[in-house]
């Protein structure tokens, strides 16, 4: 079984944050339908426009070892996308002023250079 490794924004350097955000903001050709359907099956309804806003303007919150990035926009839309395959995995709402005080730091043990990792996916 493959263990999911994750790195949170609070653990990233400014360069890592800037790299991921610029990359996701600039990418195009996203496939959103399966992620929107996944969210809807779980009682969450979002539009293409809401997801695209998160991808074009949002902040990176997390990068994981499945090649996925979590982005959150100023309105609270959180979108998990594969930067390798350009698809939306899922989407949900999290208050934009959430400071992650209850963050389970033990779940974020990945000590990797995010820039090198993401470049290796592309």
Image (cartoon, rainbow, N blue to C red):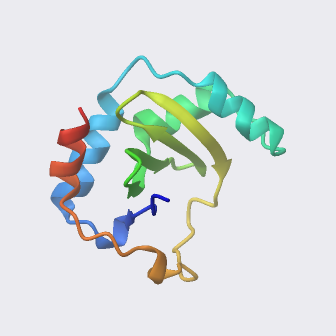
Residue at the image position 53 percent from the left and 80 percent from the top = 104
Residue 105: where, in percent of width, then height? 45, 81
Q: Residue at x 22, y 50 (%)?
A: 117
Which quarter of the figure has residue 113? Answer: bottom left
Q: Position of residue 1 (x, y in %)?
A: 50, 59
Pick the residue in front: 106 or 103. Answer: 106
Residue placed farthest to the front in the image? 1
Asked if residue 54 lies left or right of residue 46, the reply is: left
Determine the residue located farthest toward the top in the rendered image: 29
Picture layout, residue 42 above or below residue 53: below
Place of residue 89 in the rendered image (x, y in percent of width and height, measured from the top left): 57, 38
Q: Nearer the viewer, residue 98 or 19?
A: 19
Residue at the image position 23 percent from the left and 32 percent from the top: 122
In front: 94, or 75?
94
Which one is nearer the viewer's eye here, 53 or 109?
109
Picture coordinates of residue 106 (x, y %)? 46, 82
> Residue 101 sits in which quadrant?
bottom right
């Amino acid at each position: 079984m493959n263990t999911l490794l994750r790195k949170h924004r609070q653990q990233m350097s400014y360069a890592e944050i800037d790299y991921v955000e610029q990359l996701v903001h600039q990418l195009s050709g996203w496939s959103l339908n399966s992620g929107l359907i996944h969210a809807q099956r779980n009682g969450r309804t979002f539009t293409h426009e809401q997801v695209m806003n998160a991808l074009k303007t949002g902040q990176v919150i997390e990068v994981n070892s499945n090649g996925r990035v979590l982005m959150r926009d100023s309105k609270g839309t959180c979108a998990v996308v594969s930067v390798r395959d350009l698809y939306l995995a899922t989407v949900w709402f999290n208050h934009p002023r959430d400071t992650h005080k209850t963050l389970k730091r033990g779940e974020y043990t990945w000590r990797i250079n995010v820039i090198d990792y993401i470049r290796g996916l592309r």
